[in-house]
Amino acid sequence: MYADSTRRGIPFSKNPFVLKFKGRYLMYSSILPLPGSHAREIEVTESADLVHWTKAAIIGVEAPYEKNGISAPCAIVKDGVVHLFYQTYGNDRKDAICHATSTDGIHHFVRDASNPVFRPDGNWNCGRAIDAEVFLYNNQYFLYFATRDPQYKVQLQGVATTPVNSNFSRDSWTHVSVNEPIMQPELPWEGSCIEAASIIQRNNKLYMFYAGNYDNSPQQIGVAESTDGINWKRLFSEPFLRNGKPGEWNYSESGHPDIFDDGERSFFFFLGNKDHGKTWWLSQKEVFWNQEGPYLR
């Protein structure tokens, strides 16, 4: 388990995303604002074993559109450069996906001049985009995002695409789900929320790990599968990973998944707490695979 406690004296880390780059593991996560500020920022930690994490850097607020905060990072490596996708924070319907690059994945993230690079159109959503997940599949990049309905009550999942040679700027994205969401809450445990998609390729198909229900309701984690990256079918009617039992560290929720593969094994990072969000911790479990899909031991 890991949580940053340097900012307000309480453990608080959310929205993990793990990347292997230049022989080390990097984890990007959301942390609390500095004292006297209201703007959340992104922490970079590093590890040699995916268990013990050391603070490496802070990706702080820089641009005017980031003034209320940045959050929920995702990162990919393209042509030896780390591309960070993250959301603005604290703007409700106006929150959107942004893009920045770094040659070392830790310092000097250069903002995309066209930021924010994605905000959805379509009558089914409110125009918001959060929780970016970018994944290369079938010679194009898929950008999965969470948004809400026009009444701002139900959290839904959408997707956009861009060519394999894309620079990820605003004009490069095509909103594929412009007519309807690709996922919406359907099962009782999903409440009014589907968010935080995390994608992995196995068995010649894609698997989406996603969070169902709003924070501490409790949020739990499900899995869906797809052969085209757009049409998804749930694998289970019950959560793949539940919240903990009373008294356990994740009693209030197990949420916001990140499925990570290091080339040999798969690890599933997620957040949790037992005090209805007064603190937040990050943890991981190893995920195993067979022809039916993922399972836990």
Image: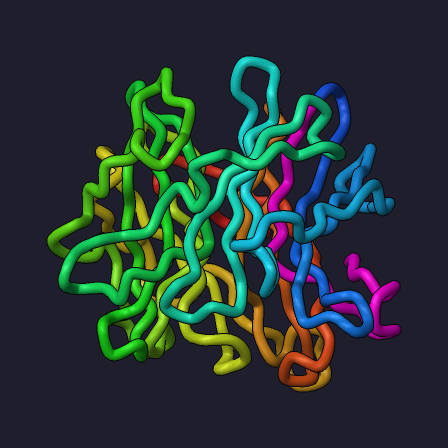
In the rendered image, residue 258, in percent from the top left (x then y), is placed at: 55, 48
* Quarter-of-image position of residue 261: top right
In the rendered image, residue 18, in percent from the top left (x then y), is placed at: 64, 40
* Quarter-of-image position of residue 214: bottom left
Q: Is residue 74 above or below residue 122?
A: above
Q: Which residues are magenta?
A: 1-21
The answer to whether residue 13 is magenta is yes
In the rendered image, residue 223, in percent from the top left (x then y), is placed at: 38, 53
Of 235 and 185, which appears nearest the observer?
185
The answer to whether residue 118 is magenta is no
Quadrant, the N terminus: bottom right
| 135 sits to left or right of 65 | left
Of 272 and 246, which appears nearest the observer?
272
Q: Residue at x 14, y 63 (%)?
A: 123
Of 52 and 286, which appears nearest the observer?
52
Q: How many marks?
A: 0
Q: Is residue 250 above or below residue 145?
A: below
Q: Residue at x 68, y 57 (%)?
A: 41
Q: Residue at x 46, y 62 (%)?
A: 221
The residue lying furthest to the front in this view is 64
| 203 sits to left or right of 289 | left
In the rendered image, residue 192, in percent from the top left (x then y), is placed at: 33, 77
Q: Is residue 235 above or below residue 24?
A: below
Q: Residue at x 47, y 68 (%)?
A: 91
